[in-house]
Amino acid sequence: MIQVTDLTLSFGSSVLFKDVDLLFTKGNCYGVIGANGSGKSTFLKLLNSEMPPSKGNIYIDPVLRMSVLKQDHFEFDGYTALETVILGNPRLFEVMKAREAIYAKEDFTNEDGLEAAELEAEFAELDGWEAESDASKLVQGLGLGEDVLEEQMSSLQENAKIKVLLAQALFGNPDIVLLDEPTNGLDIACIAWLEEFLIGFEGILIVVSHDRHFLNSVCTHIVDIDYSQIKMYVGNYEFWYESSQLIQAMLRQQNKKKEDKAKELVSFIQRFSANKSKSRQASSRKKMLEKLSIEEMPASSRKYPFIAYEQDREAGKEILTVENLTKTANGEKVIDNVSFTIKKGEKVAFVGEWDIANTTMLKLLAGELEPDSGTIKWGVSTVRSYFPADNSDFFENEKLSILKWLEQYSKDTTETYLRSFLGRMLFSQEEVFKEVNVLSGGERVRCMLSRMMMFKANVLLFDQPTNHLDLESITALNNGIIAYKGTVLFSSHDHEFVHTIADRIMELKPSGFADRLGLYDDYLEAEVLAPVK
């Protein structure tokens, strides 16, 4: 059990949250959500005692062992991957090292024998004999080979380090697990394995994530940080989202009725206050107006961009024909003799763990690369707009303001016109004069999405567009692409994003090319049976 009582955290005059009372119990998974900067990761640090609250208490039964997904990817560079995983249970690691040190002694005394016996008993009690096997199962479930356990952490690629640190957080049956963005860097297969593992977890699980499918799959409760408060709701993310939208709509409807009544009274007062015969009625209505309380909507920290893709003109029937396409990237053939056609209005997802192949394909289709062989033929009436996974080339001129940056891509350079697109993406008032060199990853993505909306293309190409976005922006982008009437080709590791948008799935893999009509979940279920072309 974790009991949070009267918790407040402030930095100077800025209050992240105040007077918070929460209870976390065994067997439940709690998804922590909130706008960027609302304090999600900070809340986990409070639970982990990495920082003290301004006021209030967090009680955790001292006999419970807490495990945390580490964010410093260099912290364990002096250890092997196996040691790093086992360090998820610090006491077991300590016992293992003490045991090794005793058995390494040349002069083994009676006292050493007694100490060794005690260590052996504790080692067995801590499941030390299964430690290496358990570590192997975890890293393999996360898509790494068993041989990675013998490697030094300093020699591993970033993606492998992330998986080893996640294995560390899950190791040894902890009582409490805190995970901050655990799906980052994981492909769909690894996320599916992680979901199954966490669904079976019997302790207290508290997770911060932007992955809606993940939150829906594993969470029994949602912990929402908003209005400088933290509130807990029963149900997964989808249930919370639908409920919150319904409540907001009801509040708006109530306020509108009150506003309409207020306008009616104000109109009457203005019309008849100067009329002596009506002055008594006007005074009566004025008193009614003063008593009428128009409740304002709470000032939520959440902001949803407005993303709507339009077409200047519809494309003709001929959209795209790809024949015998081959391309080598970084010395590896990632596209090998691939052929397909795209019909008008199709929404096609390139999925799978081979990101370089998906990115290469989208670059080829966007005209950013030339194929080694084969042809790409776009319909003459198509107008295309491309969102790259790496947008750094678009922001090389760091001294430009956001407004001047967008102006580069627009025929209409009036400030009003440009602001209309930036405003949809939450760049308002003085924010449009912010220099692009200080923008966060999420802000740069929103700039790129503004640029794409301005082009009004009839074919959209997206490569990993949800990277760096918060839940609100992902939801807005998701809904905007669903509503778009043109043709879309995209890649993403966001399960919900792919499943709700795509009506056709393509997967490039070393063994071949899979192409299947239908929804993403259907593709995943049939993948092992689907023939590889």
Image (cartoon, rainbow, N blue to C red):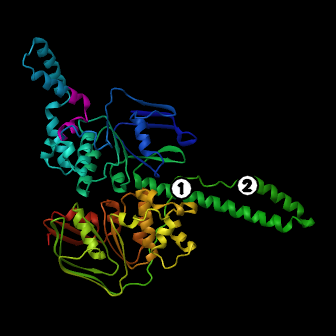
**x and y percentages locating residue 5 in the rendered image:** 49, 33
Dot 2 surroundings within 10 Å: few (below 14), some, or many (20 or more)? few
77 or 31: nearer the eye?
Answer: 77
394 or 510: nearer the eye?
Answer: 394
Left or right: 348 as drawn, with respect to 314: left
**x and y percentages locating residue 306 in the rendered image:** 49, 66
Check if mark 2's residue and mark 1's residue have beta carbons within 8 Å. no
Quarter where residue 82 is shown: top left
Residue type beneath disc 1? Ile
Residue type beneath disc 2? Leu
Query: Up-down: is 141 above or below 518?
Result: above
Q: Main secondary structure of the magenta part?
A: helix
Query: Up-down: is 508 above or below 290?
Result: below
Left or right: 301 as drawn, with respect to 1: right
261 is within the stretch colored magenta: no
Query: Up-down: is 202 above or below 371?
Result: above
**x and y percentages locating residue 273 in the rendered image:** 87, 64
What mark, if any, has residue 247 been given in the picture? 1
